[in-house]
Image (cartoon, rainbow, N blue to C red):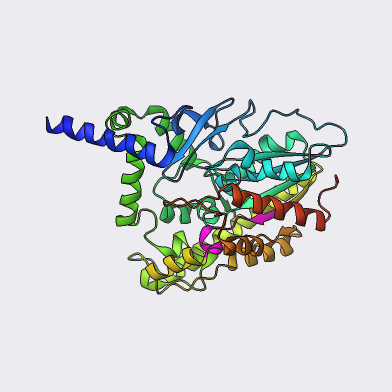
Amino acid sequence: MVLVAVFLALWVAEFGLRLVLHGHLGTTAGNESEWHVPHPTRGWAHRPNAVFRMEKLAYSEVAHINSRGIRGPEFDQTPKPGITRILMVSDSGTFGSGVADDQTTAAQLQRILGNDKFEVINLSVAAYSTVQEYRWLIEDGLSYKPDLVLLGFAPSNDVQTNYYPLQKWFQREAKRPYAKLDAAGQLVIEDQQLNEALERRRTESRLKDRIYDLLVGDMVQKVIRQASQAVTGGRKTDPNIWIGWMMMDDFAMDYARKGRTREQYEQFWREGWQVTGALIKAMRDQSQAAGARFAMWGYVSKVQAEPESLGHLQRSLPKVKFDVAKPERELKALGKQLDIPVIEMLPAVQAAATKGDPKLYFSLGDEHMTAAGHRVVAETLASQLKTMGLLQAP
């Protein structure tokens, strides 16, 4: 009777959360386990022709994936005459986690530029690293004959997930390909962790997960997971890794995990940034070889844009010296070194966030951009692409 009472209480809480937060009692279009499929070189990919509901405490929205495994409408392999095709390559920030199909950065950029001369394709997948983005670009993306490739770099996690030594300290599960430089300084992609993860997925039993899903609803699971992270820190136990060199004035050794030294932090971040630079250079080279221009911008995180979010983080980590302008500064320095145009995004997003209404980011523990945030990014991209002369076909 006690177990039955607990079971019923959990599902009463589940339905209550769904009604209060999202206004419905059930998902109508599938869940996360149904819209990703294993991929032999990237780890996972969108299931072609999938329709699924993105649902977290902060949002509930449906996304549609086309027959090519890309979010957005169907398109021809080759662009029509007179059309400049733009390919956007990034992770969840550009994929549009939490927003409707017509509110992503790509969709709003398409409306701004118009359909008569431009076509924008959103080659972005949630949780992808630069390594995975590079592989999808060269395996499929460039076959769509873009005139311009735009890389959306995520400074909050791309370096950590590109380089395996940082990944081991950043997240427990290594499930993707990683990159390194060989003795000659050449880029090498390693698949050992990816292959092991694919084999685990093929052979492991999911019975435990299915029982858990039956007993505990999805929304309650999210509350439990968020509460656990708040108490234990989750992956956010060492700010020198999950914040790291990209947004800190210096490493904060007061918060270093036991046994980790300043020399290790400096080495791993230096090597991780070198690997990331090599990946971006390879994307540029492959794009230019295919006849496309290449440019990039840095996704602006909630902490970078909102003073109150930065203040909250600063109060929780008083001995960390933050430098929220550093990611864009370092990206611009890399762009100058590699002769890659870098679109300034930080000032525009900060200015829009200062106004406060509409909100640019979700609440309830989620840091993705709202439709308003995507609009600011799309407007900034359109304006600077015109100013920099990047909207004409090569």
Residue at image position (33%, 40%) is: 221
Q: Front-most of 107 and 141?
A: 107
Q: Front-most of 64 and 192?
A: 64
Relative vertical location of residue 172 with respect to residue 207 in this rendering, above or below: below
Spot occupied by residue 180 in the image (x, y as percentages of width and height): 56, 52
Drawn side of residue 329 relative to residue 47, left or right: right
Q: Residue furthest right?
A: 82
Q: Front-most of 354 and 385?
A: 354
Q: Quadrant of the N terminus?
A: top left
Residue at image position (74%, 49%) is: 285
Drawn side of residue 389 relative to residue 130, left or right: right
Spot occupied by residue 253 in the image (x, y as percentages of width and height): 40, 72
Q: Which residues are magenta?
A: 296-306
Spot occupied by residue 161 in the image (x, y as percentages of width and height): 51, 51
Asked if one can make out residue 323 in the rendered structure from this viewpoint, the answer is yes
Relative vertical location of residue 364 with respect to residue 101 in this rendering, above or below: below
Relative vertical location of residue 142 with respect to residue 159 in this rendering, above or below: above
Tally the marks.
Answer: 0
Drawn side of residue 186 relative to residue 169, left or right: right
Question: Is residue 319 shown in magenta?
Answer: no
Q: Residue furthest left?
A: 1
